[in-house]
Image: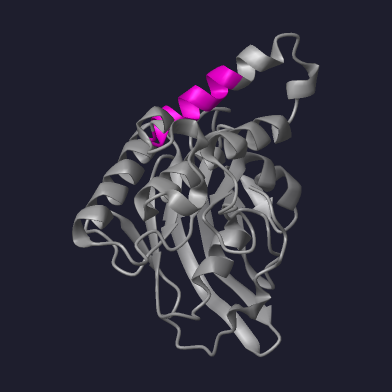
């Protein structure tokens, strides 16, 4: 079993998830070491987001097996959820365009487990927020209206960095992010992958859904089996 602060190793064998119209994904198998950078790719509708949710303990699979940091799925869903974080997943962990950067950070801090028990919780929240924002490469002070900048006014890469910072707040061992290269230019895509490489190098296992995986990422393809798939199985549960 890995130590508490290392990234999570992933061991997946023949994993499959069924939806109302058949298999969402099936036959997924791979091993990843702690701190790996993984790119989940496949055709639209091939179950990429659902695989992310399943490996973060948010969906119960129907065949095969998976272990996240040694925790078996689906038997230990709750334990996996406590060490995994989701970023930028529509309907699950998306940003509110009407809220400011500061409001998102404050809300995430208040949700953090155990903060109510800390004697100096305000200072602790501030330190945790600064560390998460720095790790995601987002400087609120450099935004047009500083921390009071609304999400709707952020550039796409800035919004993605904010989503990653909020996910990093809980110091996860597994970080999963959806559609990282959607509507990005080549330069922006390179910028985002550089950030994810840095996070993986820090020890966090990074699992990212993308259209074009970089050459240095471990690639997982959800459409390699050719099964009919159905992304409608994505739950409506919110929260990181």
The dominant secondary structure in magenta is helix
Q: Which residue lies furthest to the right in this view?
A: 117
The residue closer to the viewer here, 113 or 42, is 113
Return the x and y of residue 172 as percentages of the image width and height: 56, 37
Residue 238, visible in the rendered structure: yes
Return the x and y of residue 33 as percentages of the image width and height: 42, 44
Residue 9, visible in the rendered structure: no
Res 121 quadrant in image = top right
Q: Does the magenta stretch include residue 127?
A: yes
Return the x and y of residue 127 as percentages of the image width and height: 54, 18
Point 35% across, 32% down: residue: 142
- What is the quadrant of the N terminus in the image? top right
Return the x and y of residue 5 as percentages of the image width and height: 53, 27
Q: In this view, does 201 lie above or below 29?
A: above
Q: Residue furthest top?
A: 119
Q: Is residue 16 above or below residue 123?
A: below
Point 64% across, 59% down: residue: 92
Point 59% across, 51% down: residue: 98
The residue closer to the viewer here, 124 or 174, is 124
Residue stretch rendered in magenta on the structure: 126-138
Q: In this view, does 38 lie above or below 212?
A: above
Q: How many labels does the image show?
A: 0
On screen, residue 79 versus residue 208, left or right, reads right
Q: Which residue lies furthest to the front in this view?
A: 145
Q: In this view, does 99 lie above or below 139?
A: below
């Amino acid at each position: 079993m890995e130590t508490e602060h290392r990234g999570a190793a992933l061991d997946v064998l023949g994993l499959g998830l069924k939806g109302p119209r058949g298999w969402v994904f099936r036959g997924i198998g791979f091993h990843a070491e702690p701190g790996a950078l993984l790119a989940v790719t496949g055709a639209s509708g091939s179950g990429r987001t659902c695989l992310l949710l399943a490996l973060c303990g948010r969906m119960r699979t129907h065949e095969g097996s998976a272990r996240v940091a040694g925790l078996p799925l689906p038997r230990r869903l709750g334990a996996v959820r406590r060490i995994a974080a989701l970023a930028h997943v529509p309907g699950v962990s998306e940003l509110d365009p009407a809220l400011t950067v500061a409001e998102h950070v404050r809300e995430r801090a208040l949700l953090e487990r155990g903060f109510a028990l800390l004697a100096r919780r305000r200072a602790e929240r501030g330190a945790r927020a600064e560390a998460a924002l720095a790790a995601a490469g987002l400087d609120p002070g450099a935004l047009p209206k500083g921390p009071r900048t609304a999400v709707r006014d952020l550039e796409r890469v800035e919004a993605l960095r904010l989503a990653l910072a909020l996910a990093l707040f809980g110091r996860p061992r597994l970080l999963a992010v959806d559609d990282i290269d959607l509507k990005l230019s080549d330069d922006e895509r390179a910028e985002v992958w550089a950030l994810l490489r840095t996070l993986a190098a820090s020890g966090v296992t990074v699992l990212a859904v993308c259209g074009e995986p970089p050459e240095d990422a471990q690639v997982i393809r959800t459409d390699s089996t050719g099964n009919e798939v159905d992304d409608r199985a994505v739950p409506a549960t919110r929260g990181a």
